[in-house]
Amino acid sequence: MSDIKTLALQCRDASQALARLSAAERRDLLRSMADALEADAEGILAANARDLRAAADKGVGTAMLDRLALDPGRLAGVAAALRDVAALPDPVGEVTRDYVRPNGIRVQKVRVPLGVIAMIYEARPNVTADAAALCIKAGNGVILRGGSEALQSNTAIAAALKRALRAAGIGDAALTLVEDLRRETMLELLQLNDIVDLAIPRGGEGLIRFVAEHARVPVIKHYKGVCHLYVDDSAELQRAVDLVVDGKVSRPAACNALETLLVHADIAPRFLPLAAAALRARGVALRGDEATRALVEGVDVAEEADYAAEYLDLVLAVRVVDSLETAIAHVQRHTSDHTEVIATGDPAHAEAFVQALRSAVVMVNASSRFSDGGELGLGAEIGISTTRLHSYGPMGLEALTVERFVVRGEGQVRG
Amino acid sequence: MSDIKTLALQCRDASQALARLSAAERRDLLRSMADALEADAEGILAANARDLRAAADKGVGTAMLDRLALDPGRLAGVAAALRDVAALPDPVGEVTRDYVRPNGIRVQKVRVPLGVIAMIYEARPNVTADAAALCIKAGNGVILRGGSEALQSNTAIAAALKRALRAAGIGDAALTLVEDLRRETMLELLQLNDIVDLAIPRGGEGLIRFVAEHARVPVIKHYKGVCHLYVDDSAELQRAVDLVVDGKVSRPAACNALETLLVHADIAPRFLPLAAAALRARGVALRGDEATRALVEGVDVAEEADYAAEYLDLVLAVRVVDSLETAIAHVQRHTSDHTEVIATGDPAHAEAFVQALRSAVVMVNASSRFSDGGELGLGAEIGISTTRLHSYGPMGLEALTVERFVVRGEGQVRG
């Protein structure tokens, strides 16, 4: 048997014990994991310094080095995040349905852990602790396959967390860090569909497409966020300006940032000059269709590709549309199934927009930047799914469980 | 663009209109589909007669011919099933969560259709109507890829159902029957992960493994049911006998039939002779371990493979275990994640069994044969999932939807 298959089977075995802990025991385990991280802070930071030196020697860029870097403040943040996860309501055992059938059998739907979750991610070492905490809180074993740049940091973090597992009487294989980072080993991991219940890739679109194309295990994908704001003819002007500015500017590199602005033709002459001034004051470059360019000077031409682009930058594509229906058709054509927003004063238009679109998050008069597990009240987020299966949109603890049936009778038979 | 991709894109486009129908409109559409089937009964039965003749000429066996055959009674049953589906509660638009965040945004989770579902199935032509009805009721487009033996029947059924779609103003591509049954065309369909949201294979384990191995679209799998009954030392004797007889005998070829019986050593001397007599009176052959063979004469030796077997026949593997824990460990080792039953008089033992096992359906003092969408109150069943993702266990209409977020604010921004 290959090494990675052996590791995966050990993880699965250990995960059974994790699933059987009580909610209070899992909460205490998460707290011990946070304590262990703090106790090992010195060693973790030293390992991280070695990763940083090696990365700098390889000529890794500043942005990547920043993502890789830990310091006492960031590490304290990671431990605090673990304590936050510890305090969340435990999803395992939650009864979501409960009814009695005519023959007297009582049927419940009850949440159980998925089993074994493989996280495939890139440079950020905090993901090692964050993802492990969420998986373990929901009773799952976790196999962590991070990037090579962070291997020393990840190993030190995993060692601390494993100590907490052992202290709780759980086999520390419940948290398994893959140290063999060869691509063929990852491919083998992604083929273990009788052992691994779910793979979650976190990183750039390239990594996610690679995992999705090669996996035989189920994958929850988050490709990209081409988020739209449609400003309806009935929208309140200043509110709509606030929504476009917040959506585009508050964190342009986030997947829930706005990328395309659609404006109804009847409000465009009043709205677009105001919006353009506010956006430009914050450094945003606009690319528009002819109608936009006729209303605002100095707007670059938007090519067809601009309406499919996830800029992740201070750039916004703009188009004037003649109706709500045209706006909906534009979104349907270009949607990444992430987040779409309508600014409107007309409840019927709001409902038509919500009903017509099947994106993971559809908002009325609220910023696209709320499309986030924390902001939507999930407590924490292990990712955002843009595929309509199992979980759609920001994924919290519940998304790491599945509902199964528990039936209680008094000897009923079907006959 | 390939033909199958063109068909899939047309199905996706038409499915959008289906998703926007009201619940009443979708209910009426399902009723019209039932009417259309009845109106075309003569043509459908003639097409089925052609399929049957061709299959008989090819030397197809009696069991397969029976699965393929339609007659006026069976066709009326299919139409009646469509009307039953029409009457089920509509899952689309159901609000499963509704809360207000501290900043005043209102967050709802609302069910939406998955989008496009590909059904891959074998000889039974009734699946064409049943599966289409469930997918369409939940607002999904459906691509049907049946077996070659049933192609004439399936084409005639699909033509009737498509007429009902057109009469409702829906593009009839919302129901697409694949008439090109080459294997490479099916493989291409299973690669269309940007268009097809879910594939559901229905048939033998071979078909399901083939689909699972070649699909890049998500697949809900149902491999097999190796269902266990554990008779605890506290079980009521006659009740336990009834459960094993019903589980094994009432429909041995069903996936929810019992395949393995585990008996606590303390009750085995009283239980096993009773159970063996009752089972043998109904033609069941037993294969047991040494302890079983010491208690009941004429029991064949159970090999290790017997405890992994899905007999689908009047054969039962039996093992005597020394404790509840041993029974649980046996199930954990051999489970197909389908259905497990405990017969017990001890509530603590019942709970330990339920908590320890993560199978899709776990039952206390009820027959495994209730592990079925209809029996569990789902109204209808499109399949049974034995994979812990999205849906686990019998799948009804809800399993053909996913929850997404709808957020309503008054201009809130994140800042």
Image: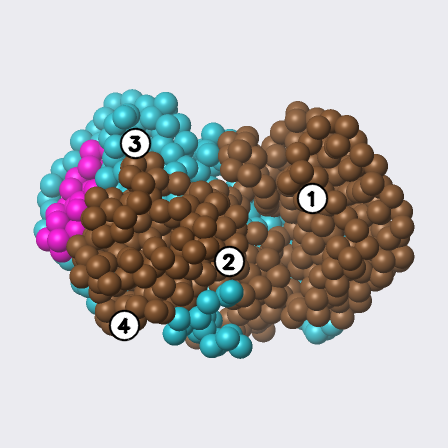
Chain colours: A brown, B cyan
Q: Which residue is mark 4?
A: A345
**Chain assignment, label 1:** A
The mark lying in front, picked from 3 and 4, is 4
Amino acid, disc 2: Ser
Is A354 inside the magenta-drawn segment?
A: no
**Chain assignment, label 3:** B
Is B259 situated left or right of A391 in this image? right
> Secondary structure beneath disc 3?
helix
* C-alpha gap between disc 4 and disc 1: 43 Å
**How many other residues sit within 10 Å of disc 3, few (<14), some (14-19) or many (≥20)?**
some
Q: Tell me which label, 2 or 1, sits earlier in the chain.
A: 1
Q: Which residue is mark 3?
A: B5
Residue at (25% x, 32% y) in the render: B6
Highlighted range, magenta: B149-176
Q: Residue B320: x and y, percent?
A: 76, 52
Which numbered circle lies on residue A127?
none
Q: Which residue is mark 1?
A: A66
Q: Residue B193: x and y, percent?
A: 41, 37
**How many other residues sit within 10 Å of disc 2, few (<14), some (14-19) or many (≥20)?**
some
Q: Which residue is mark 2?
A: A250
Residue at (41% x, 31% y) in the render: B191
The lab-note entry on whether marks 4 and 2 share a chain reads yes
Q: In the rendered image, which quarter is residue B59 located in?
A: top left
Pick the front one: A404 or A385: A385
Is A281 situated left or right of A233 in this image? right
Evaluate if marks 3 and 4 touch, with contact meaning CB atoms under 8 Å apart.
no
Amino acid, disc 4: Gly
Q: In the rendered image, which quarter is residue B186 located in?
A: top left
Instruction: Say above or below: B354 vs B299.
Output: below
* C-alpha gap between disc 3 and disc 4: 40 Å
The lab-note entry on whether marks 2 and 1 share a chain reads yes
Residue B401, can we see it?
no
